[in-house]
Amino acid sequence: MATKKPGGLAEVIAGVTAISTVGKEGKGLTYRGYSIEDLASYGTFEETAYLLIYGKLPDHQELQQYKQKLQHMRSLPTGLLTILEQLPGSTHPMDVLRTGVSALAAFEPETAQHHQYEIADRLIASCASVLLYWHHYHRNGSRIDTATDNGSIAGHFLQLLHGDRPSELHEKAMDVSLILYAEHEFNASTFAARVTTSTLSDLYSAVTTGIGTLRGNLHGGANEAAMELIERFTSPSDAESGVMQLLKDKKLIMGFGHRVYSVSDPRSDLIKAWSRKLSEAGGDMSLYHISERIEQIMRQEKKLFPNLDFYSASAYRLMGIPTSLFTPIFVISRLSGWSAHIIEQRANNRLIRPSADYNGPNEASWAPIANRS
Ligand code: COA
């Protein structure tokens, strides 16, 4: 295993949380004490979001009410639809989401009545609407109805994207993906959202901070970058020689490695199984086999394991999702984790403001502008 570099707040304990544990024994992940394996096998994304935001698993009635509540929050203000129409069709979908969240703050600002829990639920329910209204309007000029009759966010997303009800397999695969992406302790975007929250800013501002931070390729953007890598190759042997060359050129292979996990990313095995199921159901194993060969080379050459982003890429492609929407899906899911952290930060707030070691010049003496060279 390659050695870790200093800096980047690696291994620094930057606060306390009761929301999740990451990397126990180098590999475990729990949300409020529940293992990611149990949540992905027996739960749904709505139960997971409720667990994260409200602090406990919902009972039957609470879950039904929560799902209905989210379903009723899918329509967007007309002014926001106009803004989405005005954005260029070439806008990056992450810019669309960040702008959509900012604009919603203007239409539905945070107040004592419209409080943090309402906004958290509203954003989880309506970000697919923001994204896919913009997507369809700029692709074919259609102004879609963003309120579908699909009860789950996973099914709703796929239905809005493709225009018809998804298969059970696709809906379940998407649901599992949303569960896996929902929460991950003090990852960069969550930490950034907590920093914004710690200044007593509003929830929308903290979420836009999170979206901006998630976008980079070292964080959420890795699922799109992984897809671009996998799609370059026509066969497993092509992938093998291509990845060997990239490693020789000292390039990063997106979708591999992790700051906290040292043994494996527990989410990867779960999404890998779904990528396989989707490949088998679609009768085309090529992406899966190429991905497996890249995994094998990375283990052999770098002792690095795939993270959640790597097999998410092929799973999303097999559900017919365009690559540019991969990271925005991560946003829809992670809104639940961000919201939980924003609420937790507020409950016991202290301004997050670390110190730095100074390594700049000592005692520079002021020179009038005419004397500067
Ligand atoms: N491909 C190739 N080499 C990698 C690598 C990857 N995906 N991930 C880590 N390494 C190498 C680094 O280049 C470094 O080598 P060096 O010491 O010779 O420079 C070494 O492994 C140690 O990695 P380090 O930079 O200390 O990791 P980090 O904790 O700072 O970064 C990530 C963690 C996730 C940012 C990093 O693994 C990465 O860039 N992965 C690809 C992007 C990605 O998948 N992000 C999603 C994360 S969930």
Image: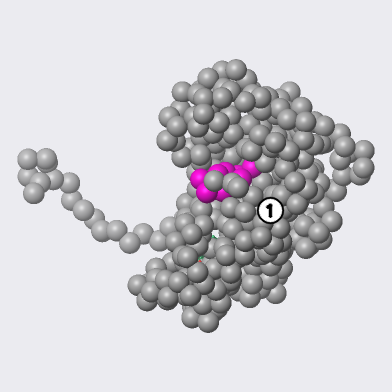
Residue 14 visible in the displayed image: no
| Residue 210, quarter of the rendered image | top right
Side of 262 where 227 appears, left or right: left
Q: Is residue 354 above or below residue 113?
A: below
Bounds of the magenta span?
323-332
What is the basis of the colouring in this image?
one colour
Side of 217 where 201 appears, left or right: right
Residue 292, image x, y percentages: 58, 71
Q: Is residue 208 above or below residue 341?
A: above
Foreground residue, 249 or 6? Answer: 249
Residue 40 visible in the displayed image: yes
Residue 209, image x, y percentages: 53, 41
**Residue at position x 66%, y 60% in the image:** 283
Q: Main secondary structure of the magenta part?
A: helix
Q: Is residue 223 magenta?
A: no
Tag 1, which secondary structure? helix
Foreground residue, 105 or 240? Answer: 240
Side of 89 where 33 appears, left or right: right
**Residue at position x 56%, y 24% in the image:** 142
**Residue at position x 54%, y 55% in the image:** 223
Characterize the local packing of mark 1: few (<14), some (14-19) or many (20 or more) Cα atoms within 10 angstroms.
many
> In the image, what residue type sits under mark 1?
Ser
Query: Which residue is denoted by mark 1 in the rendering?
Result: 177
| Residue 70, quarter of the rendered image | top right
